[in-house]
Amino acid sequence: MSHCRKRCKRQLTKVFRFFYRFLTGTLEKDSVEDDFELSTVCHRPEGLDKLQEQTKFTKKELQVLYRGFKNECPSGVVNEETFKTIYSKFFPQGDSGAYAHFLFEAFDTNKNGSVSFEDFVIGLSIILRGTINDRLNWAFNLYDLNKDGCITKEEMMDIMKSIYDMMGKYTYPCMQDEAPREHVESFFQKMDRNNDGVVTIDEFIESCQKDENIMQSMQLFDNVI
Amino acid sequence: MASGVAAWLPFARAAAIGWMPVANMPMPIAPTEKNKRADELIVLNVSGRRFETWRNTLDRYPDTLLGSSEKEFFYNEETKEYFFDRDADVFRAVLNFYRTGKLHYPRSECITSYDEELSFFGIIPEIIGDCCYEEYKDRRRENQERLMDDDEDKKDAKLPNMTFRETMWRAFENPHTSTMALVFYYVTGFFIAISVLTNVVETVPCGATPNTKEVTCGDRYTVAFFCMDTACVLIFTVEYLMRLFAAPSRYRFMRSVMSIIDVVAILPYYIGLVMTDNEDVSGAFVTLRVFRVFRIFKFSRHSQGLRILGYTLKSCASELGFLLFSLTMAIIIFATVMFYAEKGSTSSKFTSIPASFWYTIVTMTTLGYGDMVPKTIAGKIFGSICSLSGVLVIALPVPVIVSNFSRIYHQNQRADKRRAQKMQKARLARIRISKTGSSNAFLHSKRNGLFSEALELTSSIEEEQHLSKNQSLLESQHHHLLHCLEKTTNHEFADELCYEQSYLEGALQSYPSQSPSLSSQEGMTGTCCTRHTKRNHAPLPNSSILTCALSHTHPHHNLQELSTIHIQPLNTSRSSLNMRVDEPARLNCQSGTITTAIISIPTPPATTPESDAHPPPPGPALQNVVKVSAL
């Protein structure tokens, strides 16, 4: 009710101001709303040497990474929208927004809504230069949406659905609605040792180490850069 | 390829870590860089100005000059730089395209030189960003019009072997071409003037003989005027008949505006000849004389300005219509108000609302004859409001008409708008194709990948190189990423059309199969390779002839080429052009599957003009889909 009244009042003042201006013949248009958002937030990363200590990249690799990073995000930080836009350029057929959101959460370690170059490069260093265990840990961190140490079926369902969404509509064979659910079931069958409905970090790492396919695919990341 | 964000490809590939623990199948092997060299700076010397950039920046667009090996032709060994003898200013825009992924059009550059530079460096101008695209298109259109003007001047050139008729028509349309035409042109003009003058003078009272009232000149010198009129009409008739004879399309000539004016100009005379004796219709005969004034419109053949005015009025017909409409509204409103305001006063001239119309019109156009004047106070108030608003209402559409006139005068016609619309559609189509080219590129390369896998077995190295040479490292890494996703989800990317076909197949499974024994024996296979050209988003039964052909062959039948129906692509992006596999490749493949060509046609009779397939099954086509199996 008060909302209505506020709106009424605002309209009335607008009408009065309009008539006043009309009668006195003021030529200026309505004042432009000064929405000055100081969006010139600029973030500069720490020095190259410090980054080199924190990550396992060489100086040259850091330089290449930073150049690419700064090209897309001149302000020095990536917000979620930009992140999603960039990621979607690689998957033109599907909708990669959900998966990009999970990635963003995983990269944004200090939970401030933006990914700086340090976060970015530290995450990349774990994935590309870390040990297999580090990588598996990182993957578990990605799956564990609420960061409580275990993956539930719902969380896995979300992740799976986001992956399947990236395929888009036009696939062969036709994407059935049950496909993600079935995949989640098979995943839990493989991973959940004690059948308690959740996958803890230990179960996860243990099951992955036993699976040859996964071990092999983890080594794909060795020579990405 | 998402060239603009090529630098983020390592990140995208790293992000694939989320898929690995979930996947049930092994991942494909990553492409290795054969000769991995650190990123180096290369120097581009353009007419003395040195530009430096990373090699990777240029590699983002492999189907342009700078991105491909074509630039090696310009390499200068002594100075270790690439020298281009071109315009350095335009090169800035070209290089910025590589850096930022957006092509801009510098406004200070001439459009032709810009186009030349773009075509030299192998960049299509359609990808100019939206910020500069309007300007670019406008300049281009101006240029084309200028060229068209030149062409029109050349049109006057006399072609050899013109028939007499064609010569005459040319003489009529362009009087400057020959002396005879010019003479004719001036003579007719003179006579038009004479005729109009005669009509005018005819009505002037000239000299009264004593004891009679004033007579007009026309009545006094009847014979002279009659002779003059006859002469003019004779000339006009002859001219009209000659034009009719010479016109290339007589029907079209008779329908044109100028010929109608001609006819209307001379018809009253003949009608008058016929009807002079009949007294009853002499009143009508007098009215007909009014039409003689239309002869003045014949001048529009002689005057360019009159024609432009005519075009203007035609083109702002909508504005004029609006003016008329708003005026009518205002007139009715004010007339009503004035009538009721003046109703009370005695001896008021405002006897009815239509009578007040006259007052309103005269007031709104600020004429103010004064024959009708409001007497009551209310009437005076409303009358003043009426005259004030009249000025506004009439003044508003005038600038529109004026600007229209100047616009037409500078030759901005409707035809250009139509052409621009066509260009816009073509441009959008091209951009769409180049944007979706990345997904198509993946599917193309998958097919190529299949080819190359098979070729490895037959160890024909040249063909493999030929097929894979056009893929840059970036592309292969991107495709590997998409391949990983496919393996994770156990589904494959497909074209829209293949998707629709497989959907349809799924629907058709319920129908009893009427296809020949072959297909029922060995079933249908796998990947669809559609070479679809026109992006027809219409559902399947409406699409034109497509071929979804497969190139796996049965191992027992060695040399199997399934000739695919090639439909030349309308607008394809350059990358997909590079990727197109033209020659039907011979394959020997381990997976023994049957070749199936699914040809969908709009009409039931199957047309398979080129494939060496068996003739289609005699059964009726199921929902316009005919399955033809070929060996």
Image: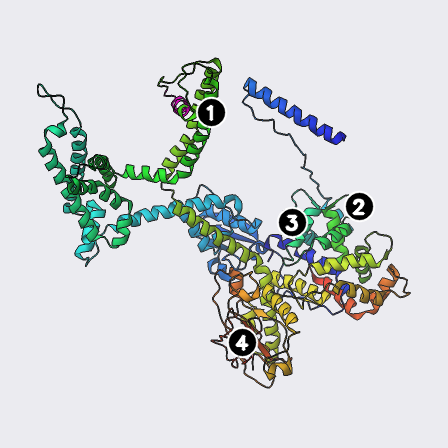
- Looking at the image, is mark 2 or mark 3 earlier in the sequence? 3
Q: Are marks 1 and 2 on the same chain?
A: no
Residue at the limit of the structure toward the front, as seen here: B280
| Residue drawn 80% across the image and 57% down it | A143
Q: Same chain for the residues at labels 2 and 4, yes or no? A: no
Closer to us: mark 3 or mark 1?
A: 1
Q: CA distance from mark 2 to mark 3?
A: 23 Å
Residue B405 rendering spot, x and y as whole percentages: 36, 36
From the viewer's perspective, is the residue at label 2 or at label 4 nearer? Answer: 4
- In which quadrant of the rendered image does the C terminus of chain B lie? bottom right
Q: Which residue is mark 3?
A: A67
Asked if both marks, 3 and 4, belong to the same chain, the answer given is: no
Quadrant the N terminus of chain B occupies: bottom right
Chain ID at mark 1: B
Label 1 crowding class (10 Å Cα cut-off): few <14, some 14-19, many 20+?
Answer: some
Nearer-the-camera pick, B622 or B582:
B622
Q: Position of residue B155 (x, y in %)?
A: 26, 51
Q: Residues within 10 Å of mark 2 (few under 14, many from 20)?
A: few
Secondary structure, mark 2, is: loop
Q: Which residue is mark 4?
A: B585
Residue at numbered disc 1 = B336
Q: CA distance from mark 2 to mark 4?
A: 55 Å
- Residue B209 placement, left or right of A179: left
Three-letter code for the amino acid on which mark 2 is drawn: Asn
Q: Quadrant of residue A149?
A: bottom right
Q: Amino acid at mark 1?
A: Thr
Instruction: Judge whether residue B360 is colored magenta.
Output: yes
**What kind of element bears circle 3?**
helix
